Image (spheres, rainbow, N blue to C red):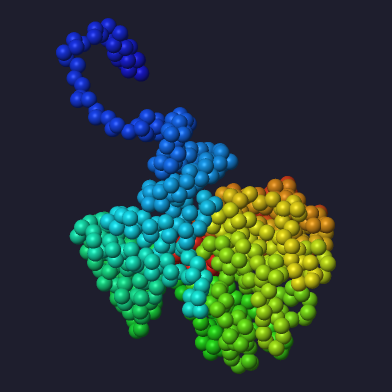
């Protein structure tokens, strides 16, 4: 340390004694050429992040050139820079609003302003920015593609977005609203332009081949996707690309029923780099092969032993798949189902939803189910992620409510009234229950104890600004939204997937639990009567660290009158919590006191403290329970 201090002091001393160098020894580069442009000063200010000064300069220019689209675009850029750099959410949101106004003006002044079209399309494509409109985003992006047909990198990025989870509205007799095929087909058209126009073996061409393989596979065209995967594999430049292509190709072979070839692709991916995902996929593929399993090195075998079952003490629950026998083995993708005796014949019937499919209704005929979707008046009804058989009008017949697939974007929910004789009538708009948000869970319960079921919907799956809503049943077949006036004030940035209804405080009315999505906190709204709710999560002890909450429930344990709540995590490492409601008298199994509210965390006590629940190795259902 002393030597370092001495050295530093010596350097400073020499710097103070240094004489100016002779002018002839100073080397400078040639003068930097300056672009003559009225925008020059403002652009230099933007490069230095001096956005306010840049806007002042641009505003002066705008007075003499009000129709100049480029000036409006640069004003938008200045606000976008403030938006992305901002730390205060309210101020950032204001900056984004001003940016959108300036971009809209730029496009009005010049409908072919490519940079303004690109910027606005990106904002409309991102749900969390609260301007989500995928159809408008695609229209603008498609215009850019026509204006710049050789912008291959942009076309590749656009194609990747189109073939993702985004859904586009296009309703017809053959395609559901928010049909995934719309985006996939649009993506494939753009990818063909890149493959036919890009430099051979360029990064854009390689990416286009791989994205085409993925798009075809997502459409179900597995055989057609494989040649594109093979071309992408020959062009892969690093291990990550090779593994991704091999995994995609292995999945296509698996879907074609060629399990041996599928296993070979997953095995090759393991040779590139050992990883648990391809290890599990190899296990899945080899388990489908007929005959003895192929000899494989122990290092690639998935370490999962078959459960040992004592014949003398068989499991209490054992399930057998009988869907095909009963005629309900429909390929739905992932979706929801609802059970209920809609026709009053004493047998439980079934409604099925899926992804990118129409709803299906199956009538229980005893030995088998019969699809009666068309006869019931439910033809061409899009699927949702929550189906409810409920009697909302108290006429003794089960009606059907559908909360649409919020992952696909905002879309109005549907309510079908049971008219008797096996027929349903769409009363969505007339009833006022057609909530327009990006929904997920829909729940029904009598929140005011008037004998009629009220409705609660979890909205904001995409963080698109839609919020959970509460609808009061007026008792005359109509509903009224009472969310804000009831004291439920949800920030647009929170969103929700999981909502639960339950009387946690045993005061005779239903309370509302909302599981915190992403970094949002849990919210517990206590029902105080007369359509007033108070948020009491912290007082009740239901606070968790950020856990990206998924579904949640209230439930009770046998021999314990105290209700519980259950909140499951999604996507990240497990943050599953079971909260046991405290009793006034401590119970022998209560364990240590945790927190000061009526609930305490009991995760470990209930054996729910598993880690990494959403790992592909665990085989976990969306609800968080192991299959």
**Residue lying farthest left?**
24
Query: In x, y percent, where is residue 356?
Result: 49, 72
Q: Viewer-proximal residue, 249 or 410?
A: 410
Residue 97 lies, with reference to residue 526, above or below; the image says above
Residue 517 relative to residue 235: left or right: right
Residue drawn where x is 40% and y is 73% of the image? 219
When asked about the image quadrant of residue 185, the answer is bottom left
When asked about the image quadrant of residue 5, the answer is top left
Residue 328 visible in the picture: yes
Residue 274 relative to residue 499: left or right: left
Q: Viewer-proximal residue, 512 or 532?
A: 532
Residue 283 visible in the picture: no
Residue 575 relative to residue 507: left or right: left
Q: Viewer-proximal residue, 444 or 426?
A: 426
Query: In x, y percent, where is residue 560?
Result: 76, 64
Quarter of the rendering occupied by the N terminus: top left
When asked about the image quadrant of residue 565, the answer is bottom right
Query: In x, y percent, where is residue 19?
Result: 24, 7
Q: Viewer-proximal residue, 558 or 358?
A: 358
Residue 40 lies, with reference to residue 217, above or below; the image says above
Residue drawn where x is 70% and y is 70% of the image? 430
């Amino acid at each position: 340390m002393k030597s370092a201090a001495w050295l530093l002091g010596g350097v400073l001393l020499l710097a103070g004694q240094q004489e100016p160098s002779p002018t002839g020894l100073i080397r400078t580069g040639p003068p930097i050429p300056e672009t003559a442009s009225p925008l020059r000063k403002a652009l230099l200010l933007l490069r230095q992040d001096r956005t306010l000064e840049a806007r002042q300069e641009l505003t002066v220019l705008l007075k003499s050139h009000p129709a100049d689209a480029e000036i409006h675009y640069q004003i938008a850029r200045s606000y976008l820079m403030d938006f992305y750099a901002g730390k205060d959410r309210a101020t950032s949101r204001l900056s984004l609003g001003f940016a959108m106004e300036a971009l809209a003006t730029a496009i009005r002044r010049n409908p072919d302003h490519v940079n303004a079209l690109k910027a606005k399309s990106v904002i409309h494509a991102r749900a969390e920015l609260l301007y989500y409109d995928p159809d408008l985003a695609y229209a603008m992006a498609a215009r850019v593609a026509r204006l710049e047909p050789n912008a291959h990198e942009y076309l590749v990025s656009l194609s990747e977005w189109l073939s993702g989870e985004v859904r586009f509205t296009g309703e017809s007799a053959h395609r559901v609203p928010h049909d995934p095929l719309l985006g996939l087909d649009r993506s494939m058209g753009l990818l063909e332009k890149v493959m036919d126009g890009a430099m051979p073996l360029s990064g854009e061409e390689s990416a286009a081949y791989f994205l085409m393989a993925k798009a075809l596979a997502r459409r179900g065209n597995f055989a057609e996707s494989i040649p594109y995967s093979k071309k992408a594999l020959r062009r892969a430049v690093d291990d990550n690309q090779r593994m991704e292509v091999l995994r995609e190709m292995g999945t296509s072979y698996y879907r074609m029923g060629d399990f041996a070839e599928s296993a070979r692709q997953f095995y090759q991916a393991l040779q590139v780099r050992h990883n648990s995902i391809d290890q599990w996929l190899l296990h899945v593929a080899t388990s489908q092969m007929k005959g003895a399993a192929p000899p494989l090195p122990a290092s690639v075998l998935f370490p999962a032993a078959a459960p040992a079952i004592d014949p003398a003490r068989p499991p209490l629950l054992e399930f057998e798949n009988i869907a095909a026998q009963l005629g309900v083995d429909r390929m739905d993708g992932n979706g929801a189902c609802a059970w209920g005796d809609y026709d009053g014949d004493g047998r439980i019937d079934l409604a099925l939803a899926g992804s990118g499919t129409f709803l299906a209704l199956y009538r229980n005929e005893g030995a088998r189910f019969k699809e009666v979707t068309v006869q019931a008046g439910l033809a061409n009804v899009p699927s949702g992620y929550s189906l409810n058989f409920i009697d909302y009008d108290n006429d003794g017949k089960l009606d059907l409510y559908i909360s649409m697939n919020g992952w696909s974007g905002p879309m109005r929910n549907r309510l079908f009234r049971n008219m008797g004789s096996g027929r349903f009538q769409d009363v969505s708009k007339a009833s006022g229950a057609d909530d327009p948000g990006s929904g997920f869970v829909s729940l029904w319960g009598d929140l005011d104890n008037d004998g009629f079921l009220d409705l609660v919907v979890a909205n904001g799956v995409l963080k698109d600004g839609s919020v959970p809503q509460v609808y009061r049943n007026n008792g005359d077949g109509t509903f009224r939204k009472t969310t804000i006036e009831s004291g439920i004030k949800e920030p647009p940035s929170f969103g929700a997937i999981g909502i639960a209804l339950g009387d946690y405080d045993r005061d005779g009315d239903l309370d509302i639990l909302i599981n915190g999505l992403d970094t949002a906190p849990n919210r517990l709204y206590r029902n105080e009567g007369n359509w007033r709710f108070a948020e009491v999560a912290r007082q009740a002890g239901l606070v968790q660290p950020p856990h990206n909450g998924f579904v949640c429930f209230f439930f009770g344990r046998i021999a314990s009158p105290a209700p519980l709540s259950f909140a499951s995590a999604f996507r990240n490492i497990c943050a599953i919590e079971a909260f046991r409601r405290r009793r006034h008298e401590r119970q022998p199994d209560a364990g240590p006191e945790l927190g000061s509210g009526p609930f305490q965390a009991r995760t470990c006590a209930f054996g729910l403290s598993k880690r990494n629940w959403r790992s592909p190795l665990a085989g976990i259902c969306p609800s968080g329970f192991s299959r």
